[in-house]
Amino acid sequence: MPATKKILIVGGGFTGLTAALRLSADKNFAITLVESSSQLGGLAAGFPVGGTSLEKTYHHLFLTDTEILKLVEELGLQEKLIWRGSSVGIFRDGKIHPFKTPLDLLRFAPCSFSGRLRTGLAALYLKHKKNWRGLTRQTAHDWMTRACGRSAMATIWTPLLKGKFDRHFQNVSMAWFWARIHTRANSRSGGGGEKLGYFRGGFNVVTTALENEIRQRGVKILTGATVEKISGDHTAAINGETVPFDFCLFTGPSPAFAKLLPAQESLNDYVAKLRSIEYLGAVCLVFTSDQNLGDFYWININEPDAPFLVFIQHTNFIGKENYGGKNVYYVGAYLAPDGKVFSLPDDELAKLWFDYLKKMFPAFDAAKISERHIFRFRAAQHIVDTSYEEKIPDYKTPLPGVFLSNFSQIFPEDRGTNFAVREGEKIAALIRQENAG
Ligand SMILES: Cc1cc2nc3c(=O)[nH]c(=O)nc-3n(C[C@H](O)[C@H](O)[C@H](O)COP(=O)(O)OP(=O)(O)OC[C@H]3O[C@@H](n4cnc5c(N)ncnc54)[C@H](O)[C@@H]3O)c2cc1C
């Protein structure tokens, strides 16, 4: 009988949970999963609204999310998954314009007619283009300006890039942009429009199923516990206590990982890579109300002075009957975690954003809001610039037995729960291989 190996998994998001699921299939592993938050789920974690669970940050799936769809089937959760057509709009020039079909694009008045045609052609080209390699070192800003022209940049693309990447918007790699367009354009069923998926009971149904399965297989789960240090002698400090491990997997943000590692020369290059990756934070304001603010599910805010990126009417996708009859809304922005707006007191931030919502919807009445919540995540989106490929840290660190798997290693695709599942599977296979010698 081979000796039991101790595995420490740091992080209870989709990557850590999937890795725990796959590694726990091996009876010779004694696994502890440590999560600093009081709950599992990471960026996809939920909170109670109207008797069910809702994500703190807006979430849905695409038809192309094959890895998580396989896992959902394995966990027997297919019946919880609902696929629906989306309805997307753009707020520009004081008006919401439908922006879902090719016809909507042709009718998008804020952009010049030639800009609309060129945008349509560029989207078609990117949808069918398979090889993204040559795009890595070009910026999305330059490539799209050449392809679509200045009017389309000003009214469609620059606001989206700025909303997602803040002051880094001109440095984002075209390979990342290709992946975004490619995925969305291919998340269409047959001749119909885009289909999006969501779970009855929220993404929490997947988190809970994973939690139950790994607990049942003997994985020890510690929530509200933080790994403060990882040492070269196969030990980690968890809430001040030294714990031994044979293998340690870290799944949190790269710069946070750098802080846990010992200062030793053999790690210098690796740590420099970890530190070179910059992150933006995300702020999501969620509110419920009896007021119905129109028919769109998703509205991108493309005005130059907009204080947020997106307004989502969640219950236009998943009916309000699921939330005690209330409409559920998200207002979201990606912001520098050390910037002023990120840390504004809740009431000030809500006032700033609600004042803008009033501009979008003159009938909007903040007094009719029943619940309001503000969630902040400091490391929500990494900056995928044109030299990003060189920054991606290896899964295997120079410290024996210590591994990293997080969304900063996903490229060119955007991070997402689907890729977290894929990466969780991949890292589990690598650790098993390492164990087998
Ligand atoms: C605004 C927003 C919208 C999104 N929308 C979608 C969407 O529509 N669809 C989709 O699929 N994905 C979406 N995503 C992305 C998705 O949520 C993430 O890609 C996925 O959840 C990442 O999982 P992860 O496990 O890799 O990382 P995380 O979820 O970040 O998990 C890492 C965990 O590690 C923990 N941790 C870190 N350091 C320590 C430590 N030292 N000790 C203990 N614990 C630690 C953290 O607390 C965290 O829980 C969205 C993300 C955001 C921010």
Image (tube, helix red, strand yellow):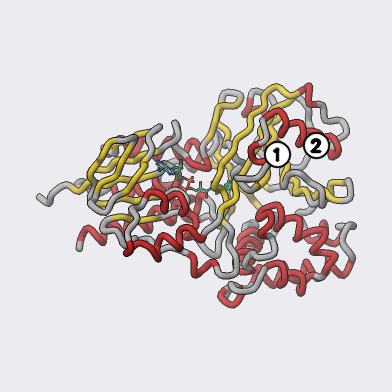
Q: Closer to the camera, 362 or 77?
A: 362
Task: Say if residue 130 shows up in the picture.
Answer: no
Q: Secondary structure at mark 1?
A: strand
Q: Is residue 31 left or right of residue 420?
A: left
What is the crowding at mark 2: few (fewer than 14 residues within 10 Å), some, or many (at least 20)? many
Q: Is residue 288 above or below residue 180?
A: above
Residue pushed farthest left? 1
Based on the displayed image, in which of its 4 quarters is residue 11 positioned?
top left
Q: How many badges with numbers are in the image?
A: 2
Q: Closer to the camera, 387 or 122?
A: 387
Q: Residue at x 71, y 55 (%)?
A: 162
Q: How far across and down, in percent of the image, does residue 321 sit?
A: 66, 27
| Residue beneath disc 2 | 357
| Residue beneath disc 1 | 331
Q: Amino acid at mark 1?
A: Val
Q: Residue at x 29, y 39 (%)?
A: 219
Q: Secondary structure at mark 2?
A: helix
Instruction: Name the image quarter holding the C terminus.
Output: bottom left
Q: Residue at x 73, y 42 (%)?
A: 311
Q: Residue at x 57, y 37 (%)?
A: 55
Q: Earlier in the sequence, mark 1 or mark 2?
A: 1
- CA gap between label 1 and label 2 equals 9 Å
Q: Is residue 414 left or right of residue 114?
A: left
Based on the displayed image, in which of its 4 quarters is residue 314 positioned?
top right
Q: How far across and down, in percent of the image, does residue 432 sit?
A: 26, 57
Are discs 1 and 2 less than 8 Å apart at CB?
yes
Q: Closer to the camera, 226 or 409?
A: 226
Q: Amino acid at mark 2?
A: Leu
Q: Is residue 414 above or below residue 367?
A: below
